[in-house]
Image (cartoon, coloured by chain):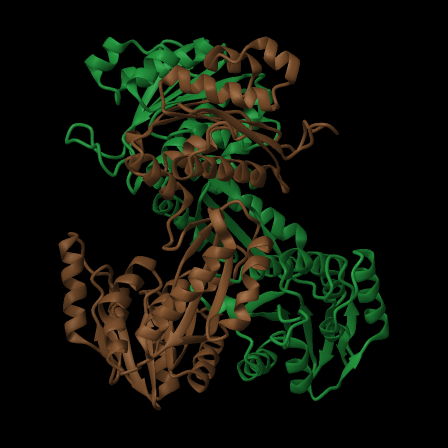
Chain colours: A brown, B green
Amino acid sequence: MDAEIIAVGSELLTPYRLDTNSLFLTDQLNRLGIRVIHKAVVGDGPEEMRSSFEHALARADIVVSCGGLGPTDDDRTRQTVAELLGRRLLENQDVLRKLQERFRRFGRAMPEINLRQALVIEGADVLPNPRGTAPGQWIEARGHILVLLPGVPQELRALMEAEVSPRLAKLGNQQRLYTRDLRIVGLFESEVEQRVRPLYAEFSDTETTILATASGIQLHPRIWSDDPAYAESRLNELVGRMTLSLGKHLISTCGETIEEVVARTLTESHATIAVAESCTGGLLAERLTSIAGSSAYFLGGVVCYSNQLKTQLVGVPAELIEAKGAVSAEVALALADGVRQQTGATIGVGITGIAGPTGGTPEKPVGLVHIGTADPRGSREKAFRFPGDRERIRFFATQNALDAVRRLCLFPPVPQEE
Amino acid sequence: MDAEIIAVGSELLTPYRLDTNSLFLTDQLNRLGIRVIHKAVVGDGPEEMRSSFEHALARADIVVSCGGLGPTDDDRTRQTVAELLGRRLLENQDVLRKLQERFRRFGRAMPEINLRQALVIEGADVLPNPRGTAPGQWIEARGHILVLLPGVPQELRALMEAEVSPRLAKLGNQQRLYTRDLRIVGLFESEVEQRVRPLYAEFSDTETTILATASGIQLHPRIWSDDPAYAESRLNELVGRMTLSLGKHLISTCGETIEEVVARTLTESHATIAVAESCTGGLLAERLTSIAGSSAYFLGGVVCYSNQLKTQLVGVPAELIEAKGAVSAEVALALADGVRQQTGATIGVGITGIAGPTGGTPEKPVGLVHIGTADPRGSREKAFRFPGDRERIRFFATQNALDAVRRLCLFPPVPQEE
C-alpha cells in the first residue's frame, strides 16, 4: 500500500518554515508497511488545494493531510475535500457539544467562528482530538482512504497514534518495515559511505540511508518484508557486517547518541569527569550536561579562553604556555591533568585549538585542535585537523573528545604503550 | 508569476530527511517577485516523477526541480522530463569536455556512467555548474519555464545565484517581495502574537510570519508590491508599530541573533565578560563564544555543577550555600560577583537553577532559575520559572542571561533603584 502526505498551510510556502509533520507521519506509516510515494505542500488557495488532493487520490491508496482544520476563513481543508468528493458538510452535534464543553472548561464562551470545526464531511468517521478543538476525519471514497488531521504537531501525533494507526493496522497489510539505527563517531559521511557501500550489492533486498546530523553520522538500514523472522535476521546479518567495517567508530546499534553512550559508560565505570576547554568555549561541558542525571558523573568545567585563566583556574604553568604556545600538545595535557587535580575527578579532559575564522598561522592553521585526557593510569594527547567553519570545528572537537572518553572507559589503554 | 518546486530523491521520502533546498529557492524566487504556490517531494520512480512534473506544469508558470541529475541509474530527472515534453536527450560535446576536464584535474579517468551527465534535453540552455559535475538545464516549453538543478545544496545555490536568478530577473516581472527580519527575546511565541496581531487588520496589505526557532522568536513582515518606495515605507511604518508593541524585547530589526547583538554591545562598550554556570552546564559560555572574535570580550567561564567547585573555583562561601541552598538568589549573585572578581572582567554572570527532570521540590520546582549579573555599578538578580523539558529550560535560561547582559549595556540600571 502506498500513501501520499499533503501539508496544508500558506506559511509552509515561505522561506521560513518547513513541513516537519511528514517525518513523523512517514515513520508511523512505514511501521505499518505503508510506503510514502509523494509529499506535497500547498497553501490556502482553494484551487491549488483541490488540485493537490485530486492528484494524490489518483496516485496513492491512502492520502493523509495535515493542517487547514482551524476555525478561520483560511482553514479550507474540510470544504475543499467535501467539494472534491461531491459530498455535503454536516454539522455534527456530538463534535459541537464537545467543542462547547472544551470552551466552558476554560471559562470562555465559544466564538461563532469555531462552529466551522463541527462540520464533518458526509460519511466520514470523526476522530476525536483530545489535545485541541479540531477533530480528525477518516473518509473512505473511490476505493481510497483519506485522513484529515490538524497541523499542530502535538494534536497530530496524539490523533495519529490513538486513532489513525490502529485503523490502518486493521487493513490487513502484511508487509512491514524493519529498521536499525546505527550511530558513528570519528568518521566523515563519505568515509562511512565508502566503508559500507560494498555491502549494498550483497544486501540488495535492504536499503540504507546515511545521515549527517548535528550529533554525528547515522546509518538507517531497513527492509520491507511480510516475514518478521527473515527481516530481523537479515538486518542482524547486515548490521554485523557493518560493525566489522566500522570498528570502534560504531558507538551504538540502537540509536544512542554519543552523549548517552558516554553518560552510560561513565556511570557503569563509576567514574567522574571534569573538563577544561579553550576553543570549544563550553560546548563539551554543555554536551556532557545535556543528559538528565549528569550531576552523578560531571563535576565541573572551566572555559579558559585567556592564557591568564588557563594558569589561574587550571594551573597550567605560564612558562609552558610561553614556550609551547596556548595551542599545543603540552597545554592540552596540562589542561587535562590540571582540571582533574583541581576537581578530584577520575577523568580530566583538556581541549585547545583554533576554531577560526581568524587566529590561524602556517604552523598552526585554523582547525588544528589538541585533545588531552588524564585518568589514574596517566595522560595522553591527540592532535586533529578539522575542516569547515567555526561551528563545525567546535562540533568535531567535542565529538572526538566525547569519543576519547568513551574509548578510555571501554578500551583501557595498554600500559607502556601510551 | 507563480512557481512550483519539485524535490527529487527517494531519501526525501524516509522519516529521516527533509527537503531543505526549497527554503533557499523560495527566498530567491520571492525576491524576484515570484510566489511559490506548491511544493512536491517525489522519489526515483519514473511514473510518480512524471506525474509530479506534469501537474506542476499545469499549475505554475515556473517549475524548479532539484535532484536526480547525478550519474547513477536512479538519477532520472533528465530522462523523465524529456519524455514528458516529447523531446530527445542529446549528448552535449561542450558539457562532455568539461566533465572530462574536471576528472582530469583531480587525476582520475571519467567513469562510463558519468556520460549520462552530458545529456541535455533538446532545446534546453545548459547552466554551467562550477561546483560539481551535473550542469543545470533551462527549458522553455508550453509557455512555461522549467529549471532543472542538482540537489547538492552548495551546487544548487551557486547555480541559482549565478545562472537562474539573473535569467528570471529579465522576465520583466515588476512585482517584488519586500521583507524585514525582527528578533525578539524574553517573550513566548503566543505573547509575541498577542502583541502584534492587532496590527494585522490595519496593515492588511502585508503578511507576517511568526517563527519560534532555536535562537528565539522571529517576526517576518512582508509585502508584495511593484512600488519599492511604497513597500519600504509601509514596512517601516509596520515595524515602527511593532517596535512600540514589543518594547525592550525587540533586539534587532535586521536579523541579528541575540549572540550577535551581545557581541556587538560588549565590543561597543569596551566591556569584557566572564560567566559562572550551574544548571546551564556551559551553554551560556558556548553561545557567547559561538561568535568569531569572541576572545576580544569573553575572558572565561566556570561550569560548577558540584557545590564544592562553586566554592573552590568561584569563591562562593560554603556557609552561604548551606544556608540558602545552591539554587538561590544569593548564590546566583555570589557566582556573578565571584567570577567577575576571579577573572577581572567588566561583567560577571551567574546562573543557578533546576533544569530537571529530577531535583525539583515544591519550594524549588523544576524550571526555577536564578540569574545574577555583576558590573562596576553593583550586582542584581532575577528569578525565572521556565516551562518545558531540560533542553528548553537550559535554552530559556541562557537566552535571558544574554538578554540581561544586553540590557545592562544598553539600558544601564538607575543608581539606588536596584
Q: How many marks?
A: 0
Residue A52 picture location, percent across and down: 47, 78
Judge left or right: residue B65 versus residue A46. right
**Along the viewing direction, whichever of B275 and A171 lies nearer the viewer:** A171
Q: Position of residue B307 (x, y in %)?
A: 29, 18
Q: Is residue B38 visible?
A: no
Specify the quadrant of the image occupied by residue A327.
Answer: top right
The picture places residue B388, in percent across and down from the top left corner, at 29, 42
Assign the N terminus of chain B to one quadrant of the image. bottom right
Viewer-nearest residue: A28 or A62: A28
What residue appears at the point 20 percent right and 32 percent down from the top-left corner? B360
Q: Is residue B99 visible?
A: yes
Left or right of residue A322: residue B311: left
Q: Quadrant of residue B56?
A: bottom right
The residue lying at 62 percent from left, 48 percent from top is B232
Query: Does B81 appear above or below A262?
Result: below
| Side of A247 relative to B296 (left or right) | left
State the residue at coordinates (34%, 59%).
Answer: A153
Q: For the view shown, which residue lies furthest in the front direction? A: A416
Picture layout, residue A273 above or below residue A66: above
Position in image of residue B317 (x %, y %): 29, 9
**Which of the pair B379/B359 is nearer the observer?**
B359
Q: Which quadrant of the figure contains the C terminus of chain B?
A: top left
Residue A262 occupies quadrant: top left
Judged from this view, the residue extending furthest toward the bottom is: A142
Question: From the viewer's perspective, is residue A309 above or below residue A144?
Answer: above
